[in-house]
Image: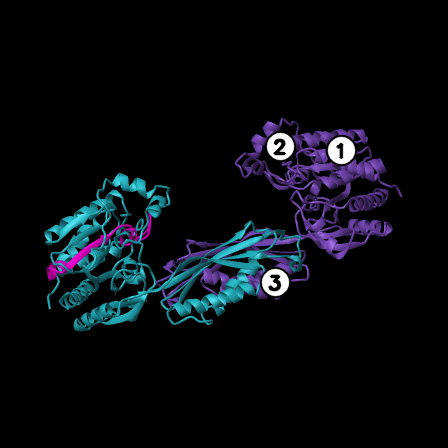
Chain colours: A cyan, B purple
Amino acid sequence: MPRIDGARLMADLAALRAFGRCGTGVDRTALSAEDIAARRWLAGRMAEAGLEPRMDCQGTVLGRGAAARALLIGSHTDTVPKGGWLDGALGVVCGLEVARTLGAGIDIISFQDEEGTFLPCLGSRAFIGDMTLAEIEAARARDGRTLSDALAAAGLHGTPLRAEPGRYRGFLELHIEQGPVLEETGHDVGIVTGIVGYRRWRIHAKGRADHAGTTPMALRRDAGATLLRFAADAATQLLAAGGGTETVWNIGWISFSPGASNVVPASAELVLEFRDLDALVLARIEAWLCRRLAADTSLAGEEITHFAPTPMDPALMAALERAAAKNGARHLRMPSGAGHDAMILARAMPTAMLFVPSIGGRSHDPAEDTAEANIVCGCQVLCDAAEALIGD
Amino acid sequence: MPRIDGARLMADLAALRAFGRCGTGVDRTALSAEDIAARRWLAGRMAEAGLEPRMDCQGTVLGRGAAARALLIGSHTDTVPKGGWLDGALGVVCGLEVARTLGAGIDIISFQDEEGTFLPCLGSRAFIGDMTLAEIEAARARDGRTLSDALAAAGLHGTPLRAEPGRYRGFLELHIEQGPVLEETGHDVGIVTGIVGYRRWRIHAKGRADHAGTTPMALRRDAGATLLRFAADAATQLLAAGGGTETVWNIGWISFSPGASNVVPASAELVLEFRDLDALVLARIEAWLCRRLAADTSLAGEEITHFAPTPMDPALMAALERAAAKNGARHLRMPSGAGHDAMILARAMPTAMLFVPSIGGRSHDPAEDTAEANIVCGCQVLCDAAEALIGD
């Protein structure tokens, strides 16, 4: 079995890290000067590897191999503001190393704006043709810049890259886990079973603003207290109502209005989200939520985000698993709790993902890191799986 | 027993309402043009009533009666932004009506800035000499204007009014209840037993920001969940731990940080306040709070506001109670859950307060109102109590 060149891989990762480096982290948001420079560097490395590079009008870079059919490997090189050095960059550079190791039959890609500076998964959605012009026209960054202006300023040309019909055997994405599970459980790689679905609900409570000194407790209509009772019930009942062992949920935002310490809250809101790979689990939790809201007329709620789970392709998962076993890599089947380009690609072709451990579970942060041994191991597993898949 | 002139009282209230009127409410914040104009009008009405008016350099207006000793009656004519038409104005105009009805022996006062546009109870604190120049120099409104600039712009002169030593038999303040108790329980007037003490605590929870999709529930340190458990315990245990029948408490503000729906809260804060007339009750609740904080190392708290209860003078309360009984007014002994100038005056002289019902408990709002019959009844009770006190 062909061996990847770990030193070459690490050297490329270090070279890519220099674009937008800030301390131990990287700031290379989509369409920034650093992002475009990194993509031009990547295209150069692809050409040196014998791939035919093409950067499209959005910045997505494809390195096309010589064969008529190919396995697509990649991820994204854009980052969140002040993000980590690996994240998607690791998957792109590992793909490049696999292509260098295996020769023909591999295409490498770095999709644009996976992180959603303007439009999440812009590049992968465009690549499979699941993106409208209206969305591109409406997209803008948090600071108000429109995607259209940013694209014009980047000086890119051509049309968006599209997957050639019939060309791809499938898509493999290697990514850092962005969570603590592999490290905590002592595994070398994660075989991603799917990308979890998630739902977000905004929960409102209605009450009446009263002076908190002059209004006896029994005469209040305290929206804050109503919402806190809901939150307490969620803490004790939500998982019991139908969650699986991997279900996660979160209340990340809460607000009382008018928000003064001496005024009984007139209204109160929180956002609750829950995630699972099993659509049935999500449905059972939603049923609990609807029953709980119906039980209190001061409460109301609405779903604000709904993503269905995306299972990974069983044949590609099996190839990754066999490659892990062949390398003696301790591997764990696990869902991905975060979204990835693979979630998009799975709509168009067989897709699978491989995780490597994140030290301390950190990501989207300059502290993000993965041990070199884990990086090299992950890349070798990816390479062996790719070899098996292109040989089929 | 002398009868007040209800029509004259209501006419004066209507005249005062014209200064800063906005819809059914009044906007007459301290030192605004409307506030100063209203105070000049008041001084004129005092002079017509045979009192010697004086407006000080801060806008506090005293109408001095002819006798060597006097009972002081009053409140404040400044309002909160877009406040109600009665609030403190009612107590000032009722005092004026009592002085007109009884003749000598009554001084009338309208203190400046009870509402704290610049400095809460500015006028009453200056009147009893409990105010430093440093406080005045540091005071500024929410919009940044300093008290010093506002005083200069108002064009007032002289020195702050000070209570003449030995002159006062005591202070009576009539005020709207600003709560729903008298209306709900069918009483005409409230005999205020004291102004409750209150304490405010800021409660912090510390955790760690984690991706809410990739971090299993068991591996999180969720500051939001910690704080919500604290709030749930407060709801079930705080009053049981030592609250009395009149204890009130509130969580009016809460915040999670970073506050994103897909990030486990790294820190969380709320402000808890509790009020009671009995210092022992406050101490028992505080003891519960300290035990609860000590039981969870992720929690911490600090007291940010501490006001001791202010009991009212028993002899003055008894005079108000006898006057209510004489008038057939259904009266209720009750604490004041809100602060008033009486809280300040009680440090310097025997002080009592009389409440009239607030329709729907509304106050600090254009919807604030009190039935005319309740206003006239309250003023007559005040008058009869004053007559008894100046005749002693």
The secondary element bearing badge 3 is classed as helix
Toward which corner of the image does residue B241 lie, by quadrant?
Answer: bottom right
- The label on residue B284 is 3
Q: Which residue is mark 1?
A: B63
| Outermost right residue | B1
Q: Which residues are magenta?
A: A99-125
* Quadrant occupied by the C terminus of chain B: top right
Seen at 53% across and 59% down, the residue is: A300
Residue A86 visible to the viewer: no
Tell whether position A105 is magenta: yes
Q: Earlier in the sequence, mark 2 or mark 1?
A: 2
Image side of residue B351 versus residue A199, left or right: right
Image side of residue A303 versus residue A162, left or right: right
Q: Position of residue A336 (x, y in %)?
A: 32, 64
Q: Residues within 10 Å of mark 1 (few under 14, many from 20)?
A: many
Q: CA distance from mark 2 to mark 1?
A: 21 Å
Q: Which residue is mark 2?
A: B32
